[in-house]
Amino acid sequence: MMDNGEHSIIQGIAPPYLKKGDRVAITCPAKKLPNPMTDAITLLQSWGLEVILGETLDLSFHQFAGDDTQRAQDLQRFINDDNIKAIIAARGGYGTIRMIDKVDFKPLLQNPKWLVGFSDITVLHTHLYNNFNIQTIHGQMPVNIPDASAKSLESLRKALFGEDISYEFTPNLLNRIGKAEGILIGGNLSLLAAVAGSVSDLDYNNKILFIEDVGEYLYAIDRMLRMLDRAGKLKNLAGLIIGGFTEIKDNDIPFGQTVEQIVMDIVKEYDYPVCFDFPAGHIPDNRSIILGRSVDLLVHNHQVVLNYL
């Protein structure tokens, strides 16, 4: 395991990139599936990959894809199998935090492999980087593929096969201009708050933080960000990237601030660059980003650029 303090300077280990003929596994560490994985299997096979399906794709225990032990064992099976080159979470929802402590991730130190997913899978992203210094891919999951943009799916293929996935997009008027270099960390805001203080928590110092969320109340977003700030996690960031905040709700008595206003109010004392509308999160155009890797973030008046180093 890595010492937490080392992470300010050490970028994560990149697992071997995929090549045609490789085996990839789909497992379900959280909520159970509503539909078969037909579209995902077809897509991955079109990339020349052999798809192995976990037992959890057919299991059901309350809202979960099998009980906590079954979901942990399914993930463990693919971690232990040296022939599996990437593990793709079928969906998010809720449940990964219930089973993560039943999983032995140490085999990944000898045989690192890509883990793919977002939302509830943030728990795995943070845990693997904090404890094992392994890069992971925040990107589209099989359950989202029928509604996913072509560009988001292509970005996942590029990330898995080791092609360039730098991004350039139009800035939001509320962005804070600047440039930063640092290791990209983050994921779903609710899960970052949920793992705070645990063995799966992150060292935020000198990092570029990415956050996104879905279906939350404005007051809850404010509360979670203030919790991270009071814990000292936002003070020493190198930069802040805000992805999709979708299906956001308000109370009968309006909260009075937008997500952008909440963010800028909380980080107003700091001077690092902040960009909104990054194309990642619970949106059809959910572009893949590699967490645990060093990036350059340039936030200009006329464009925003994210380059992997």
Image (tube, rainbow, N blue to C red):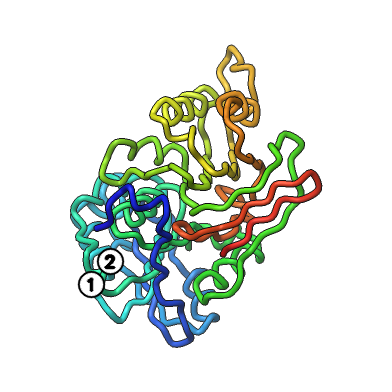
Considering the numbered disc 2 on the image, is that residue within a helix, a strand or a loop? helix
Which residue is label 2 attached to?
55
Residue 145, horizontal then vertical, whole percent: 55, 62
- Residue situated furthest right in the rendering: 302
Q: Nearer the viewer, residue 229 or 186?
A: 229
The Cα–Cα distance between marks 2 and 1, rounded to whole angstroms, is 15 Å
Residue drawn at point x = 48 percent, y = 60 percent = 293
Residue 80: numbered disc: 1
Q: Disc 1 marks which amino acid?
A: Asn
Quadrant in the picture for residue 197 = top left
* 15 with respect to 44 (left or right): left
- Residue at the outermost top position: 253
Q: Establish if 67 lies above or below 76.
A: above
Residues at badges 2 and 1 in contact (C-beta under 8 Å)? Answer: no
At which x and y percent is residue 245?
A: 58, 39
User: Does label 2 or label 1 sit earlier along the sequence?
Assistant: 2
**Which residue type carries mark 2?**
Glu
Residue at point 52% right, 22% down?
219
Q: Between 248 and 232, which is closer to the camera in this rendering?
A: 232
Residue 140 visible to the viewer: no
Within-10-Å neighbours for mark 1: few <14, some 14–19, many 20+: some
Q: Is residue 63 above or below residue 150?
A: above
Residue 253: x and y in percent read 59, 12
Please identify the quadrant where the C terminus is shown.
bottom right
Q: Residue furthest bottom?
A: 21
> Is residue 148 in view?
yes
Which residue is pictured at 47% across the width and 57% down the height? 291
Closer to the camera in the image, 282 or 241 = 241
Question: Which label sits in the foreground, 2 or 1?
Answer: 1
Residue 163 in the image, given as x and y percentages of width and height? 58, 75
